[in-house]
Amino acid sequence: MFSLSLSLSNPATLLGSSSFPPTSCRKSPRENWSAKLQTIWAVNRCSKSLARYPFLCPHRLSLYKKADHDSSISAILKDDSPVMATIEEETENIGILALDPSLGRFKDHLLYRTRKYVEQKKLIEKYEGGLEEFARGYLKFGFNREKDGIVYREWAPAAQEAELIGDFNDWNGSNHRMEKNQFGVWTIKIPDCDGNPAIPHNSRVKFRFKHGNGTWVDRIPAWIKYATVDPTKFAAPYDGLYWDPPPSERYQFKYARPPKSDAPRIYEAHVGMSSSEPHINSYREFADNILPRIRSNNYNTVQLMAIMEHSYYASFGYHVTNFFAVSSRSGTPEDLKYLIDKAHGLGLRVLMDIVHSHASNNITDGLNGFDVGQSSQESYFHNGDRGYHKLWDSRLFNYANWEVLRFLLSNLRWWLEEYNFDGFRFDGVTSMLYHHHGIDSVFTGNYSEYFSVETDVDAVVYLMLANCLIHNLLPDATVIAEDVSGMPALGRLVSEGGIGFDFRLAMSIPDKWIDYLKNKKDDEWSMHDIVSSLTNRRYTEKCVSYAESHDQAIVGDKTIAFLLMDKEMYSGMSCLMPPSPVIDRGIALHKMIHFITMALGGEGYLNFMGNEFGHPDWIDFPRQGNGWSYEKCRRQWNLVDTDHLRYKFMNAFDAAMNALDDKFLFLASKKLIVSSASEKDKVIVFERGDLVFVFNFHPENTYEGYKVGCDLPGKYRVALDSDAWDFGGPGRSGSISDSSEFQVGHNVDHFTSPEGIPGVPETNFNNRPNSFKILSPPRTCVVYYRVEEDFEEGLDVSETATDVVAEVENLESTFDEEPEIIEMLSDEQTDVVAEEENLESTIDEEPEIIEMLSDEQEL
């Protein structure tokens, strides 16, 4: 047995950790963490500890003169300019170097990117009036109502001629030719007709332009707010729609945004596949039928996938064609607003899965159609190999381009202000951070892997601008990065020299569980390795942990429930028959894996739709290979709603996990101490906040009178028990009675005993000053909370005084032969009653008097 102590509340002792073996995921082939989190492995037998430091590059690497920039805007800044002098002053001190001195080796790189950020921000302030104003591009570009007409603008510097076509002019643009300015922006104003807009609401429009070889092409406007496709025509192209509903048809928000939680418990959901029926679900059906489920399971945040329009449904929403348009498969913009407002009314914050890492390669429907071979400075994308992602078959943005910055930053503001989203989950951040996009790359934790010529500084600067904008517009926003590399300072403030995300996804954790379930027998599971995998993260950079997400649910892979129970999920889940060993093990481990991931793996938690109850099928979008079937592209809610099926037990435990955090706020606590990870017993014991967690992964052994260490003395009771009947367990967890028989009951008190010398950890039990004994059945997890004293919960003063008076009267009759004792007791009674009467009038203002009364009662 060994002990691991992790304290997130003592940054002075936090050193380094290591990385994980190469793993794979949907978008990037590796997840390896460079951690600044303290890991001290204390071996009890020899009372020694082993500290693991990050392996750092031994040489100093300066990128100040090597990084490649091609921004024509930045060329106007010279080293001797007043602006540059100001930039030097503002970037002299980088806060993250104080947090992690190991980054000092790469100070030149960090200074360079910070100066680039400040430089770009000051240019925007100079020429656009500030970052927030710059991000109002949707009020200038695309279609906007102005006095007596509609103004349409499009950035297309490669176009030789341009015109606007649509239903309003019978697709003949000869009378609606556009004019081009020196910045490549085409403009036209279409006057109203008889006081009404010349372009009717919800009518089709397109941008027609001629490029250098004389060819005319039709494209959906880049800033279009809504786009649809004719569902009766196979592979039909999308049409942009002019969206400007009359006031009577505009959705009006009713509810304020819920307050930000320190620890988001996120329900990842895909609206289209959320129906029980084999069809695409709507925003309103999701709002009315699915949001209440999410709320009842005690999540506080819902993360919506596939909101931005994407012509290819099976891309899961990640090949975006129209960045400002909602996915029309599920409804209109007003329908999405209804969904978000309904979520806010239920107390749920709503995050959007935003894709700014790449764009669809689709020419007819998307931004790629504006690329006609021009230079990268006249395009949304880079030229050549740098502008193409070979694994995703998609286009890569040129983040140094002024109009690309306007487009993407305005896109963020649009979703925040038009739809009231509460934040974002940025997809594919690893691909943005590096020129190699994570392809064929292994991140070992060596800092030189993060700060080198492979780092895309332009993309880093964009992300810094994006996070600055988001938090300026909405200080309570939650912004999460999907990064598999573990780049240091990704989750630190921009003002410190960080990139500015609030959280990063702990993407190595699902791969660890998949490896265990596929490749290891139960008795081969390493408690040491599980703890290391779940706690290997950078101190002061928050993580959202998850055991599985949509990545693991896609066809060709398997969810945790599917890996555990496989085909028996289709025949062995009835409560009308005893569970098979496979089902019994599967449900038990499903609960344990998700719970320990939540409790130990991060400062937030995420679950993908349906995994909370062990949804049995993978996700298979309609495609030619499955006959365009929606059968596997749905969620079978009927399984969890059927009372005689065991899916309900996993769902109930998921709700209880979230409720536990609601009550005790352990995810937001900085106190995280792993006191034991026994390979022999297969037991992990740790404290999070003031809760004590005990996970027994042993497939057979029940431990009676098992001693667990804790911080605070007192009495402890069960707060959550995975073995309880309500969660499909046999109800074995409890305590040991005097006769050493099981006494199942969650109100049993577990009293602590002191261990060793106070303040001398090496004399304590597993480095903990107190301990108590429990019953720990196999494949169970039990959480214990410390019971507060009665007077701290509120004491009934009148009952206390009555009890004292009754005791005095009894003593008077007993000691008739001792009048002096009676007199003393009568005086005591009088004093107590008088004190009680005085307390009744002052107790609200002086709660500490309750304690004095309690002392009086004992006397």
Image (tube, grey):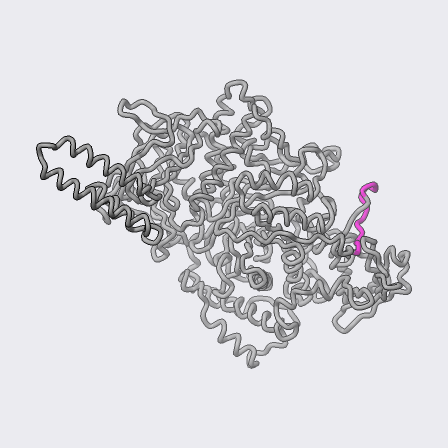
In the image, 157 versus 585, the foreground residue is 585
- Magenta stretch bounds: 231-242
Going by the image, does 63 lie left or right of 600?
A: right
On-image quarter of the N terminus: top left
Residue 789 visible in the snapshot: no
Look at 66% across and 72% down and name the residue there: 128
Going by the image, does 272 lie left or right of 301?
A: right
Look at 64% across and 66% down and name the residue there: 400
On-image quarter of the C terminus: top left
Asked whether 167 falls inside the magenta stretch, the response is no
Rendered view: 792 above or below 740? below
Residue 790 in percent (x, y) is at 32, 41
Residue 16 in percent (x, y) is at 39, 53
Residue 104 visible in the snapshot: yes
- Per the picture, the main secondary structure of the magenta-coloured stretch is loop
Residue 341 in percent (x, y) is at 64, 49
Residue 731 in percent (x, y) is at 42, 26
Rendered view: 278 above or below 468? above
In the image, 757 versus 450, the foreground residue is 757
